[in-house]
Amino acid sequence: MLEDTSFAIHPGQKKQMKDTNYKDIGNVLEVVKTDNGASVKTESGTLFIKFYRDDIVRFVFNPFGETTLKSSPALITDGEKTEVSVSEKNGEILLTSAKLQVYLDKSPLRITVTDPDGRLLVKEGAKGMGYKESKEIICFKEMHPEDHFYGFGEKTGFLDKRGEKMTMWNSDVYAPHNPETDSLYQSIPYFMTLRNGFAHGVFLDNTFKTTFDFRSEEANYSFSAEGGQINYYVMAGPTPKDVLEQYTYLTGRIPIPPKWAIGYHQSRYSYETEQEVRELANNFIEKGIPLDVIYLDIHYMDGYRVFTFDKERFPNPKQLVEDLRAQGIRIVPIVDPGVKEDPEYYIYQEGIRGDFFCKYIEGNIYFGDVWPGNSAFPDFTNSKVRRWWGEKHKFYSDLGIEGIWNDMNEPAVFNETKSMDVKVMHDNDGDPRTHRELHNIYGLMMGEATYSGMKKQLRGNRPFLLTRAGYSGVQRYAAVWTGDNRSFWEHLQMSIPMIMNLGLSGIPFAGADVGGFAHDSNGELLARWTQVGAFTPYFRNHSALGFARQEPWSFGEKYEKIIKRYIELRYKWLPHFYSLFAEAHYTGTPVMRPLMMEYQKDENTYNLSDQFMVGDNVIIAPIMQPAVQHRAVYLPEGNWVDYWTEEVYKGGKHHLVRADLNTLPIFVKQGSILAHGPVKRSTEIKNEKLTLHLYYGEYTSSSFKLYDDDGSTFEYEQGGYLIKTFDVKCEKDQISLTISNEGRYKPAWKEIELVVHGAHENIALFINGEEKYLQKKGDYTLKVTL
């Protein structure tokens, strides 16, 4: 195509200027107090202001018709009863809750939001809310020199998105993901601003194509949509964790995953036969490499028809699933939305008879070309269709399958636009809308259908769902991976800020294809990427047909040994990871965190894109270039202990650290605790003993919540869990450890060993006020059994 050559920048190729006919919403005519807010009549429509809590306020305005408080499927709450006062002073309207103040200038209408102390969150200046004749809506806010922006879901580039212009339009992008690649598979129209050590959030709940512009103007940023209402929320913060709690209060939090889902996953496009899958599993077992999941990509199906198995390639899938399960390995098959046009295919028959497929307004079904050829697409905006699709997953659950992989659900179509015709209509439960409006929620609604169906079929066991496409709220149903990356060092580098920003966008269960999906990986790259993958929430090795295989043993014994070591390390850390997933479930705080989340007043962390934290006390600083064995590591305030050597590093400065190919630099904060279990072949094997590692540091204190439950059911929602809280206080010659328990779950492990690192031999240890004897264990550690 000419667009792929230098012709794209031919001087005669000037693009038509966009509609710049911006219209302001005008002056305030009347303000009426309502429950939880106010209704503001303007010259061009009505603005609704609604407080969902003291620390969350919503602004909704429709310049093209009647303003409505109807929301997208992202929203899960109507809010709480909130005391809001409305007053007028000096020609300015003031709405006040306990944690927010909203000021309205009347002529023209301009909005300023502060906290009760007057700390500015958002402010409109020369331009505020407006619209264009093209039905585009837009909102401008002042941008301060100290502002840093995070979130936006799945975006390439560095951690801080200041200076970027980003579009939300779910897109299938197989071509290499570069910093300039904008729209990818997820559309999360939300961001967090960090200014002078304080955070606040903004969520634009608009399902049209939206744009966030932090580039075009020096003093303002804007967010806009191709249609619909101005509909955004401001969240008060003031910490990044507070913002995420507020955002996930609106859009939901992850269910605690089944334990097997946070183990190691192996995939390829494709393992094409039952025999190949069995040989793969046997290789892992014979080599002693832990494994919990093997994926089946599209080749397992009969002609790429979903809800089928190819009888020649996979003659007995039920037996395969049973045999692998007995070895601690689960099968997760891919399920795409495209249903093959085939009058002899039962899914297609049911879809036609039930009127379940997407159609044009004239009534003819939309067909698009995907893997099975000409295909119809279920209309997941219709709750009846979602129930039908969910029920179809009995096909998989009857085989013993507990996890599903949704792909191609942007939806992807093999045409020039890469997706469904925007003129297609969606039923939307009796409120018909075009695909142009609902494109970005197609994957979210498919995720709801799949997860809800599997949850029902599994009768109390937790399903696992992996999705490529999504919208705000997708975390309620699915883990997310970053799509079709490549086996480039640059893609390893780029994956870290992508996963961190997904976590900052309410999606804590995220990861990238370890080793890279397309292109040829190599031993060094796979080893270094596995080191990173072992500490990302979602840990899967995945590669494409036609490129080098990249199972752990693919590049020889030298690399296999390193890769195995770090897969084993993931299993050793599973109790710690599981506790962090529980924290994400209860609070929205991600498992994998940028340093700015824990050190929001430290400017050195604001765009630190090549390091990350696991929880609040571990820093991972991977090597991500070939033939490199040294790197600069920034350690924030406090003292930090090298996980491997126990060398202590002073915080608040940069250090040059050596790490050969065997070594991933890991640093643990003094005064804090890690929870480890034994290395094991799979999560199916119960832990008989846990080990807590306490890293002693004079005059430090910390708290760690060790979480456990049965790992497979939803009993945790009814009190079937255990939270052991360890409060640590380290003095000069004494360690005080206070342990408290919550919940009624009785874990498989009966013993916890406490290992104290870095403490001198004569230190006193008090547990719940009672002095305990510490036994020396090596040069650095002392231990006691709790």
Image (cartoon, helix red, strand yellow):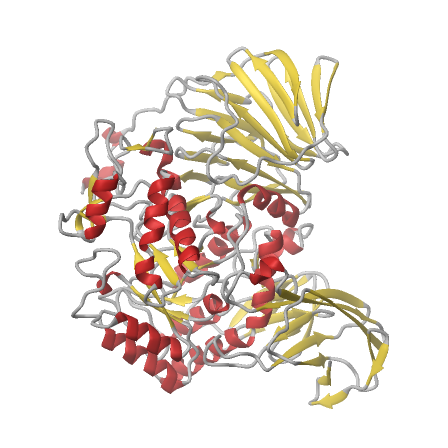
- Residue at 69%, 90% in the rendered image: 778
Q: Nearer the viewer, residue 373 or 566?
A: 373
Whether 99 is drawn above or below 600: the answer is above
Q: Where residue 458 sits: x, y (%)?
A: 42, 61
Q: Where residue 427 sits: x, y (%)?
A: 33, 33
Whether 782 is drawn above or below 708: the answer is below
- Residue at 40%, 66% in the rendered image: 540
- Residue at 22%, 61% in the rendered image: 301
Tell whether 748 sits left or right of 540.
right
- Residue at 59%, 61% in the rendered image: 716
Q: Where residue 679 sits: x, y (%)?
A: 52, 81
Residue 58 visible within the image = yes
Q: Nearer the viewer, residue 79 or 509?
A: 79
Whether 67 is drawn above or below 714: the answer is above
Q: Quadrant of residue 396?
A: bottom left
Residue 550 visible within the image = no
- Count of residue discs: 0
Tell whether 527 sits left or right of 607.
left
